[in-house]
Image (spheres, rainbow, N blue to C red):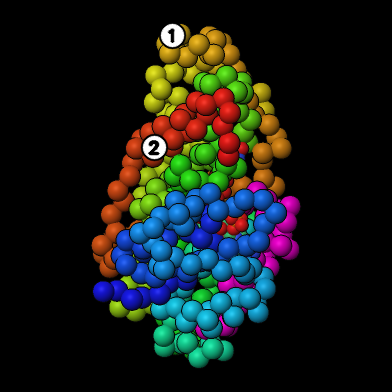
Protein backbone atom coordinates (compact mmCIF):
# COMPACT_ATOMS: atom_id res chain seq x y z
CA UNK A 1 0.00 0.00 0.00
CA UNK A 2 1.17 3.50 -0.88
CA UNK A 3 1.99 5.38 2.32
CA UNK A 4 3.34 8.41 0.52
CA UNK A 5 2.51 11.79 2.02
CA UNK A 6 1.82 14.76 -0.22
CA UNK A 7 1.45 18.37 0.80
CA UNK A 8 -0.52 20.63 -1.55
CA UNK A 9 -0.43 24.41 -1.25
CA UNK A 10 -3.39 26.09 -2.95
CA UNK A 11 -5.58 23.06 -2.18
CA UNK A 12 -8.75 25.18 -2.21
CA UNK A 13 -8.07 26.31 -5.81
CA UNK A 14 -9.00 24.72 -9.15
CA UNK A 15 -5.87 22.58 -9.55
CA UNK A 16 -5.42 21.87 -5.83
CA UNK A 17 -8.85 20.27 -5.60
CA UNK A 18 -8.33 18.05 -8.67
CA UNK A 19 -4.82 17.09 -7.56
CA UNK A 20 -6.05 16.15 -4.07
CA UNK A 21 -8.65 13.80 -5.59
CA UNK A 22 -6.07 12.35 -7.99
CA UNK A 23 -3.52 11.65 -5.22
CA UNK A 24 -6.13 10.20 -2.82
CA UNK A 25 -7.13 7.79 -5.58
CA UNK A 26 -3.46 6.83 -5.82
CA UNK A 27 -3.62 6.05 -2.07
CA UNK A 28 -1.55 9.00 -0.93
CA UNK A 29 -2.12 10.64 2.43
CA UNK A 30 -2.93 14.18 1.37
CA UNK A 31 -2.28 17.32 3.42
CA UNK A 32 -3.30 20.77 2.26
CA UNK A 33 -2.51 24.33 3.30
CA UNK A 34 -5.60 26.48 3.57
CA UNK A 35 -5.73 30.22 4.23
CA UNK A 36 -7.88 31.68 6.95
CA UNK A 37 -10.57 33.69 5.24
CA UNK A 38 -13.54 35.63 6.57
CA UNK A 39 -15.91 33.65 4.41
CA UNK A 40 -16.16 30.18 3.10
CA UNK A 41 -13.31 29.19 0.70
CA UNK A 42 -13.37 25.39 0.68
CA UNK A 43 -16.27 24.66 -1.69
CA UNK A 44 -14.02 22.81 -4.16
CA UNK A 45 -12.77 20.34 -1.55
CA UNK A 46 -15.84 19.88 0.64
CA UNK A 47 -16.73 16.71 -1.27
CA UNK A 48 -13.39 15.22 -0.19
CA UNK A 49 -13.56 16.45 3.38
CA UNK A 50 -17.04 15.03 3.87
CA UNK A 51 -16.27 11.69 2.22
CA UNK A 52 -15.88 8.92 4.80
CA UNK A 53 -13.61 7.07 2.37
CA UNK A 54 -10.94 9.71 2.97
CA UNK A 55 -11.14 9.78 6.77
CA UNK A 56 -7.59 9.81 8.18
CA UNK A 57 -6.24 10.29 4.65
CA UNK A 58 -7.01 13.97 4.07
CA UNK A 59 -5.86 16.78 6.37
CA UNK A 60 -6.04 20.57 6.20
CA UNK A 61 -3.67 22.97 7.94
CA UNK A 62 -4.07 26.71 8.31
CA UNK A 63 -1.13 28.55 6.79
CA UNK A 64 -0.08 31.26 4.38
CA UNK A 65 2.80 31.15 1.91
CA UNK A 66 3.90 34.61 2.97
CA UNK A 67 4.26 33.44 6.58
CA UNK A 68 7.54 31.48 6.43
CA UNK A 69 7.14 30.25 10.02
CA UNK A 70 3.74 28.65 9.33
CA UNK A 71 5.06 27.03 6.13
CA UNK A 72 8.12 25.61 7.88
CA UNK A 73 6.10 24.38 10.86
CA UNK A 74 3.66 22.49 8.62
CA UNK A 75 6.44 20.93 6.53
CA UNK A 76 8.30 19.91 9.71
CA UNK A 77 5.19 18.32 11.17
CA UNK A 78 4.29 16.34 8.03
CA UNK A 79 7.72 15.67 6.51
CA UNK A 80 6.04 15.08 3.13
CA UNK A 81 7.46 12.93 0.36
CA UNK A 82 6.11 15.37 -2.23
CA UNK A 83 5.18 19.05 -2.07
CA UNK A 84 3.05 20.54 -4.84
CA UNK A 85 3.27 24.34 -4.72
CA UNK A 86 0.06 25.44 -6.41
CA UNK A 87 -0.72 28.43 -4.18
CA UNK A 88 -0.53 31.80 -5.91
CA UNK A 89 -2.18 35.11 -6.55
CA UNK A 90 -2.93 33.61 -9.93
CA UNK A 91 -4.84 36.38 -11.72
CA UNK A 92 -2.65 38.18 -14.28
CA UNK A 93 -4.94 41.22 -14.52
CA UNK A 94 -5.08 41.63 -10.72
CA UNK A 95 -1.28 41.40 -10.53
CA UNK A 96 -1.06 44.85 -12.20
CA UNK A 97 -3.15 46.27 -9.33
CA UNK A 98 -1.36 44.26 -6.62
CA UNK A 99 2.24 43.83 -7.85
CA UNK A 100 3.83 43.80 -4.41
CA UNK A 101 1.40 41.31 -2.90
CA UNK A 102 1.57 39.10 -6.00
CA UNK A 103 5.38 39.02 -5.71
CA UNK A 104 5.25 38.23 -1.99
CA UNK A 105 2.99 35.22 -2.51
CA UNK A 106 4.26 33.85 -5.82
CA UNK A 107 8.00 34.55 -5.53
CA UNK A 108 8.88 34.80 -1.81
CA UNK A 109 6.22 32.21 -0.98
CA UNK A 110 7.98 29.68 -3.23
CA UNK A 111 11.33 30.52 -1.68
CA UNK A 112 9.82 30.01 1.80
CA UNK A 113 8.94 26.40 0.92
CA UNK A 114 12.27 25.56 -0.71
CA UNK A 115 14.18 27.10 2.17
CA UNK A 116 12.13 25.12 4.69
CA UNK A 117 13.00 21.88 2.83
CA UNK A 118 16.68 22.83 3.05
CA UNK A 119 16.71 24.07 6.66
CA UNK A 120 14.76 21.03 7.87
CA UNK A 121 17.31 18.76 6.15
CA UNK A 122 14.64 17.21 3.96
CA UNK A 123 16.66 17.55 0.74
CA UNK A 124 16.81 13.78 0.22
CA UNK A 125 13.28 13.06 1.39
CA UNK A 126 11.01 15.74 -0.09
CA UNK A 127 10.39 16.29 -3.80
CA UNK A 128 9.13 19.73 -4.83
CA UNK A 129 6.80 20.67 -7.71
CA UNK A 130 6.50 24.31 -8.79
CA UNK A 131 3.42 25.52 -10.69
CA UNK A 132 5.18 27.43 -13.45
CA UNK A 133 3.30 29.03 -16.27
CA UNK A 134 3.15 29.82 -19.98
CA UNK A 135 2.88 33.48 -18.91
CA UNK A 136 6.70 33.33 -18.58
CA UNK A 137 6.84 33.47 -22.40
CA UNK A 138 4.82 36.73 -22.48
CA UNK A 139 6.11 38.58 -25.53
CA UNK A 140 6.81 35.39 -27.41
CA UNK A 141 10.27 34.76 -28.81
CA UNK A 142 9.26 31.66 -30.78
CA UNK A 143 6.05 30.73 -32.60
CA UNK A 144 5.56 27.62 -30.45
CA UNK A 145 6.98 27.78 -26.95
CA UNK A 146 9.11 24.90 -25.63
CA UNK A 147 11.46 24.43 -22.64
CA UNK A 148 14.16 26.07 -24.78
CA UNK A 149 12.22 29.24 -25.65
CA UNK A 150 13.48 32.44 -24.03
CA UNK A 151 11.24 33.98 -21.39
CA UNK A 152 9.86 37.52 -21.69
CA UNK A 153 7.39 38.15 -18.83
CA UNK A 154 4.85 40.92 -19.42
CA UNK A 155 3.15 41.27 -16.03
CA UNK A 156 3.95 41.38 -12.31
CA UNK A 157 2.39 37.89 -12.18
CA UNK A 158 4.76 36.54 -14.84
CA UNK A 159 7.76 38.30 -13.28
CA UNK A 160 6.99 36.81 -9.87
CA UNK A 161 6.64 33.37 -11.45
CA UNK A 162 9.95 33.86 -13.24
CA UNK A 163 11.68 34.24 -9.87
CA UNK A 164 9.86 31.14 -8.61
CA UNK A 165 10.95 29.20 -11.71
CA UNK A 166 14.61 30.13 -11.25
CA UNK A 167 14.73 29.67 -7.46
CA UNK A 168 13.33 26.17 -8.00
CA UNK A 169 16.15 25.40 -10.45
CA UNK A 170 18.63 27.12 -8.16
CA UNK A 171 17.73 24.96 -5.13
CA UNK A 172 17.84 21.88 -7.36
CA UNK A 173 21.35 22.67 -8.57
CA UNK A 174 22.75 24.10 -5.32
CA UNK A 175 21.33 21.69 -2.75
CA UNK A 176 20.45 18.65 -4.82
CA UNK A 177 16.76 18.92 -4.02
CA UNK A 178 14.40 17.10 -6.40
CA UNK A 179 12.71 20.31 -7.53
CA UNK A 180 10.87 20.52 -10.85
CA UNK A 181 8.91 23.11 -12.80
CA UNK A 182 5.75 22.17 -14.65
CA UNK A 183 5.32 24.96 -17.20
CA UNK A 184 1.60 24.62 -17.73
CA UNK A 185 -0.38 26.44 -20.40
CA UNK A 186 -3.92 27.61 -19.56
CA UNK A 187 -6.16 24.90 -18.19
CA UNK A 188 -9.80 25.27 -17.34
CA UNK A 189 -12.72 23.31 -15.91
CA UNK A 190 -16.07 23.81 -14.20
CA UNK A 191 -13.97 24.61 -11.10
CA UNK A 192 -12.13 27.50 -12.79
CA UNK A 193 -12.25 30.77 -10.82
CA UNK A 194 -15.16 32.98 -11.93
CA UNK A 195 -12.96 35.90 -13.05
CA UNK A 196 -10.89 33.97 -15.63
CA UNK A 197 -12.15 34.46 -19.16
CA UNK A 198 -13.46 30.97 -20.03
CA UNK A 199 -15.51 30.67 -16.84
CA UNK A 200 -16.67 34.27 -17.17
CA UNK A 201 -18.06 33.28 -20.59
CA UNK A 202 -19.72 29.98 -19.60
CA UNK A 203 -21.19 31.50 -16.43
CA UNK A 204 -22.23 34.66 -18.29
CA UNK A 205 -24.07 32.72 -21.03
CA UNK A 206 -25.75 30.52 -18.42
CA UNK A 207 -26.99 33.57 -16.51
CA UNK A 208 -28.33 35.16 -19.71
CA UNK A 209 -30.15 31.95 -20.69
CA UNK A 210 -31.76 31.81 -17.26
CA UNK A 211 -32.81 35.46 -17.33
CA UNK A 212 -30.42 36.43 -14.53
CA UNK A 213 -28.31 38.82 -16.64
CA UNK A 214 -28.36 40.17 -20.18
CA UNK A 215 -24.76 40.84 -21.27
CA UNK A 216 -21.14 39.74 -20.72
CA UNK A 217 -18.50 42.50 -20.61
CA UNK A 218 -15.02 41.48 -21.80
CA UNK A 219 -11.63 42.92 -22.77
CA UNK A 220 -9.27 41.61 -25.48
CA UNK A 221 -11.32 38.95 -27.28
CA UNK A 222 -8.61 38.51 -29.94
CA UNK A 223 -6.19 37.00 -27.44
CA UNK A 224 -5.04 33.48 -28.41
CA UNK A 225 -4.63 30.70 -25.87
CA UNK A 226 -3.73 27.01 -25.69
CA UNK A 227 -6.50 25.72 -23.41
CA UNK A 228 -6.48 22.28 -21.79
CA UNK A 229 -8.47 20.60 -19.00
CA UNK A 230 -7.28 21.00 -15.39
CA UNK A 231 -8.05 17.37 -14.58
CA UNK A 232 -5.66 16.15 -17.31
CA UNK A 233 -2.99 18.64 -16.24
CA UNK A 234 -2.84 17.69 -12.53
CA UNK A 235 -1.97 14.14 -13.55
CA UNK A 236 1.04 15.67 -15.29
CA UNK A 237 2.05 17.55 -12.11
CA UNK A 238 2.27 14.15 -10.44
CA UNK A 239 4.14 12.61 -13.39
CA UNK A 240 6.70 15.42 -13.28
CA UNK A 241 7.61 14.30 -9.74
CA UNK A 242 7.66 10.58 -10.67
CA UNK A 243 10.27 11.16 -13.38
CA UNK A 244 13.72 9.64 -12.74
CA UNK A 245 15.32 13.07 -12.37
CA UNK A 246 14.08 16.53 -11.54
CA UNK A 247 13.53 18.55 -14.69
CA UNK A 248 11.26 21.16 -16.28
CA UNK A 249 8.38 20.30 -18.62
CA UNK A 250 5.94 22.15 -20.87
CA UNK A 251 2.37 20.85 -20.65
CA UNK A 252 0.12 22.11 -23.45
CA UNK A 253 -2.45 20.87 -25.98
CA UNK A 254 -0.52 22.38 -28.92
CA UNK A 255 -3.79 23.86 -30.23
CA UNK A 256 -4.66 27.54 -30.19
CA UNK A 257 -7.98 29.38 -30.17
CA UNK A 258 -9.11 32.96 -29.58
CA UNK A 259 -11.36 34.20 -26.78
CA UNK A 260 -13.83 35.16 -29.54
CA UNK A 261 -13.84 31.55 -30.79
CA UNK A 262 -14.52 30.32 -27.23
CA UNK A 263 -17.55 32.66 -27.02
CA UNK A 264 -18.95 31.57 -30.41
CA UNK A 265 -18.50 27.85 -29.70
CA UNK A 266 -20.07 28.16 -26.23
CA UNK A 267 -23.23 29.68 -27.75
CA UNK A 268 -23.09 27.20 -30.62
CA UNK A 269 -23.05 24.28 -28.18
CA UNK A 270 -26.57 25.38 -27.17
CA UNK A 271 -27.66 25.77 -30.78
CA UNK A 272 -27.56 29.58 -30.55
CA UNK A 273 -26.01 31.57 -33.38
CA UNK A 274 -24.53 34.98 -32.67
CA UNK A 275 -23.26 37.64 -35.06
CA UNK A 276 -20.64 40.33 -34.49
CA UNK A 277 -20.94 44.01 -35.36
CA UNK A 278 -18.68 47.01 -34.76
CA UNK A 279 -14.96 47.32 -34.13
CA UNK A 280 -12.67 47.93 -31.16
CA UNK A 281 -14.51 49.09 -28.04
CA UNK A 282 -17.73 49.21 -30.09
CA UNK A 283 -17.61 45.56 -31.09
CA UNK A 284 -20.55 43.51 -29.82
CA UNK A 285 -22.24 40.15 -30.28
CA UNK A 286 -25.96 39.88 -30.99
CA UNK A 287 -28.31 36.92 -30.85
CA UNK A 288 -29.12 35.82 -34.41
CA UNK A 289 -30.82 32.40 -34.36
CA UNK A 290 -32.13 30.32 -31.47
CA UNK A 291 -34.95 28.04 -30.40
CA UNK A 292 -37.60 30.31 -28.84
CA UNK A 293 -39.28 27.52 -26.88
CA UNK A 294 -36.02 26.35 -25.39
CA UNK A 295 -34.73 29.83 -24.54
CA UNK A 296 -37.67 32.07 -23.60
CA UNK A 297 -35.39 34.70 -22.05
CA UNK A 298 -33.58 35.41 -25.36
CA UNK A 299 -34.63 37.88 -28.04
CA UNK A 300 -33.39 38.20 -31.61
CA UNK A 301 -30.93 41.12 -31.84
CA UNK A 302 -30.28 41.11 -28.07
CA UNK A 303 -26.71 42.26 -27.33
CA UNK A 304 -25.04 39.53 -25.30
CA UNK A 305 -21.35 40.52 -25.43
CA UNK A 306 -19.88 44.00 -25.17
CA UNK A 307 -16.31 45.24 -24.85
CA UNK A 308 -15.39 47.21 -21.76
CA UNK A 309 -12.00 48.89 -21.55
CA UNK A 310 -11.74 48.15 -17.86
CA UNK A 311 -11.06 44.50 -18.75
CA UNK A 312 -7.97 45.33 -20.82
CA UNK A 313 -4.57 44.89 -19.16
CA UNK A 314 -1.78 47.50 -19.34
CA UNK A 315 0.22 44.88 -21.24
CA UNK A 316 -1.51 41.73 -22.51
CA UNK A 317 -0.06 38.40 -23.55
CA UNK A 318 -2.05 37.79 -26.69
CA UNK A 319 -0.52 34.79 -28.43
CA UNK A 320 0.45 31.55 -26.67
CA UNK A 321 0.79 27.97 -27.94
CA UNK A 322 2.97 25.31 -26.38
CA UNK A 323 5.28 22.65 -27.75
CA UNK A 324 5.12 19.75 -25.32
CA UNK A 325 7.19 17.22 -27.29
CA UNK A 326 9.53 16.71 -24.32
CA UNK A 327 6.67 15.75 -21.97
CA UNK A 328 5.15 13.55 -24.67
CA UNK A 329 8.40 11.64 -25.01
CA UNK A 330 9.58 11.44 -21.40
CA UNK A 331 6.34 11.57 -19.40
CA UNK A 332 4.12 9.88 -21.96
CA UNK A 333 1.89 12.99 -22.04
CA UNK A 334 -1.09 13.05 -24.33
CA UNK A 335 -3.63 15.83 -24.28
CA UNK A 336 -7.00 14.15 -23.67
CA UNK A 337 -9.69 16.84 -23.74
CA UNK A 338 -10.60 18.85 -26.84
CA UNK A 339 -11.77 22.46 -26.63
CA UNK A 340 -15.28 21.26 -27.61
CA UNK A 341 -15.39 18.73 -24.75
CA UNK A 342 -14.10 21.39 -22.36
CA UNK A 343 -16.80 23.86 -23.44
CA UNK A 344 -19.48 21.18 -23.15
CA UNK A 345 -18.44 20.27 -19.60
CA UNK A 346 -18.22 23.89 -18.44
CA UNK A 347 -21.50 24.92 -20.11
CA UNK A 348 -23.40 21.88 -18.75
CA UNK A 349 -22.10 22.63 -15.26
CA UNK A 350 -22.93 26.33 -15.32
CA UNK A 351 -26.35 25.91 -16.92
CA UNK A 352 -27.24 23.60 -14.05
CA UNK A 353 -25.77 26.03 -11.52
CA UNK A 354 -27.95 28.92 -12.66
CA UNK A 355 -31.09 26.95 -13.41
CA UNK A 356 -32.27 27.42 -9.87
CA UNK A 357 -33.22 31.04 -9.30
CA UNK A 358 -31.86 30.82 -5.74
CA UNK A 359 -28.37 29.83 -6.94
CA UNK A 360 -25.40 30.22 -4.62
CA UNK A 361 -21.73 30.46 -5.52
P1 LIG B 1 -6.45 29.27 -8.26
O1 LIG B 1 -7.72 28.54 -8.55
O2 LIG B 1 -6.43 30.76 -8.29
O3 LIG B 1 -5.96 28.78 -6.82
C1 LIG B 1 -4.94 29.44 -6.12
C2 LIG B 1 -4.82 28.83 -4.74
O4 LIG B 1 -3.76 29.51 -4.03
C3 LIG B 1 -6.08 28.96 -3.86
O5 LIG B 1 -6.23 27.78 -3.12
C4 LIG B 1 -5.73 30.12 -2.94
O6 LIG B 1 -6.41 30.11 -1.71
C5 LIG B 1 -4.24 29.85 -2.73
N1 LIG B 1 -3.49 30.99 -2.22
C6 LIG B 1 -3.44 32.24 -2.73
N2 LIG B 1 -2.63 33.01 -1.99
C7 LIG B 1 -2.15 32.24 -0.98
C8 LIG B 1 -1.28 32.45 0.10
N3 LIG B 1 -0.74 33.65 0.34
N4 LIG B 1 -0.99 31.42 0.94
C9 LIG B 1 -1.57 30.21 0.74
N5 LIG B 1 -2.42 29.94 -0.27
C10 LIG B 1 -2.71 30.94 -1.11
O7 LIG B 1 -5.30 28.77 -9.24
P2 LIG B 1 -5.24 27.48 -10.18
O8 LIG B 1 -5.85 27.82 -11.49
O9 LIG B 1 -5.69 26.29 -9.43
O10 LIG B 1 -3.68 27.39 -10.45
C11 LIG B 1 -2.82 26.67 -9.57
C12 LIG B 1 -1.40 27.15 -9.74
O11 LIG B 1 -0.95 26.96 -11.07
C13 LIG B 1 -1.18 28.64 -9.46
O12 LIG B 1 0.10 28.76 -8.89
C14 LIG B 1 -1.19 29.28 -10.84
O13 LIG B 1 -0.44 30.47 -10.81
C15 LIG B 1 -0.53 28.20 -11.65
N6 LIG B 1 -0.92 28.10 -13.05
C16 LIG B 1 -2.23 28.04 -13.39
C17 LIG B 1 -2.59 27.87 -14.72
C18 LIG B 1 -4.04 27.76 -15.13
O14 LIG B 1 -4.32 27.91 -16.33
N7 LIG B 1 -4.95 27.46 -14.21
C19 LIG B 1 -1.60 27.76 -15.69
C20 LIG B 1 -0.25 27.82 -15.30
C21 LIG B 1 0.07 27.96 -13.98
P3 LIG B 1 -7.86 30.80 -1.52
O15 LIG B 1 -8.85 29.76 -1.95
O16 LIG B 1 -7.90 31.09 -0.08
O17 LIG B 1 -7.89 32.03 -2.38
O1 LIG C 1 -7.17 35.59 -19.63
C1 LIG C 1 -8.31 37.96 -22.14
C2 LIG C 1 -7.11 38.35 -21.28
O2 LIG C 1 -7.48 35.73 -17.17
C3 LIG C 1 -6.99 34.99 -20.89
C4 LIG C 1 -4.07 32.11 -15.17
O3 LIG C 1 -4.50 30.84 -14.76
O4 LIG C 1 -3.44 31.28 -17.34
C5 LIG C 1 -4.25 32.23 -16.68
O5 LIG C 1 -3.91 33.55 -17.06
C6 LIG C 1 -7.01 36.04 -21.96
C7 LIG C 1 -6.13 37.26 -21.68
O6 LIG C 1 -6.06 33.89 -18.20
C8 LIG C 1 -11.24 39.17 -20.40
O7 LIG C 1 -6.68 39.66 -21.57
C9 LIG C 1 -10.47 39.20 -22.41
O8 LIG C 1 -5.44 37.64 -22.83
O9 LIG C 1 -8.48 33.77 -18.44
P1 LIG C 1 -7.38 34.76 -18.29
P2 LIG C 1 -4.53 34.26 -18.34
O10 LIG C 1 -4.28 35.69 -18.20
O11 LIG C 1 -4.05 33.60 -19.57
C10 LIG C 1 -2.03 31.40 -17.10
C11 LIG C 1 -1.32 30.31 -17.84
C12 LIG C 1 -1.70 31.49 -15.66
O12 LIG C 1 -0.61 31.09 -15.25
C13 LIG C 1 -2.58 32.30 -14.80
O13 LIG C 1 -2.44 31.94 -13.42
O14 LIG C 1 -8.34 36.54 -22.06
N1 LIG C 1 -9.58 38.51 -21.66
N2 LIG C 1 -11.49 39.62 -21.65
C14 LIG C 1 -10.04 38.47 -20.41
N3 LIG C 1 -9.54 37.89 -19.30
C15 LIG C 1 -10.24 38.01 -18.15
N4 LIG C 1 -9.78 37.41 -17.03
N5 LIG C 1 -11.42 38.71 -18.09
C16 LIG C 1 -11.97 39.31 -19.19
O15 LIG C 1 -13.01 39.96 -19.12
Q: Nearer the viewer, residue 79 or 137?
A: 79
Q: Is residue 302 visible?
A: yes
Number of marks: 2
Query: Badge 2 local density, few (<14 within 10 Å), some, or many (20+)?
Result: some
Coordinates of residue 221 in the picture (x, y in percent): 56, 35
Query: Badge 1 local density, few (<14 within 10 Å), some, or many (20+)?
Result: few
* Callout 2 secondary element: helix
- Magenta stretch in the rendered image: 91-117
Q: Quadrant of ligand 1?
A: bottom right
Q: Nearer the viewer, residue 11 or 197?
A: 11
Q: Decide whether residue 272 is among the magenta residues.
A: no
Q: Residue at x 61, y 67 (%)?
A: 62
Q: Residue at x 51, y 39 (%)?
A: 198
Question: Can you tell which quarter of the image residue 217 is in?
Answer: top right
Q: Nearer the viewer, residue 138 or 264?
A: 264
Q: Which of pointers 2 and 1 lies earlier in the amino acid sequence?
A: 1
Q: Is residue 17 visible?
A: no
Image: 300 above or below 149: above
Image: 254 above or below 19: above
Q: Quadrant of the C terminus?
A: top right
Coordinates of residue 127 in the picture (x, y in percent): 42, 78
Give the residue pinned by disc 2.
Answer: 345
Coordinates of residue 295 in the picture (x, y in percent): 47, 14
C-alpha span from label 2 to label 1: 23 Å
Coordinates of residue 354 in the picture (x, y in percent): 52, 29
Give the residue pinned by disc 1.
Answer: 293
Q: Residue at x 70, y 54 (%)?
A: 38
Q: Residue at x 60, y 42 (%)?
A: 195
Amino acid sequence: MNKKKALITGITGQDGSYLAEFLLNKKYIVHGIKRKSSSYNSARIDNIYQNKKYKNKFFLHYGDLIDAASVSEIINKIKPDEIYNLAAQSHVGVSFKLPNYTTQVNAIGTLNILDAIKKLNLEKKTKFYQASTSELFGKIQEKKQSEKTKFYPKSPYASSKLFAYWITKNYRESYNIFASNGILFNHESPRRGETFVTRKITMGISKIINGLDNCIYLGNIYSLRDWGHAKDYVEMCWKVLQNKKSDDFIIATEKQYSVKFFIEKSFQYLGIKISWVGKGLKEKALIKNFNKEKFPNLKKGMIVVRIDKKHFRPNDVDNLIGDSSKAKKILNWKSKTSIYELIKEMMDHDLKLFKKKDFKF
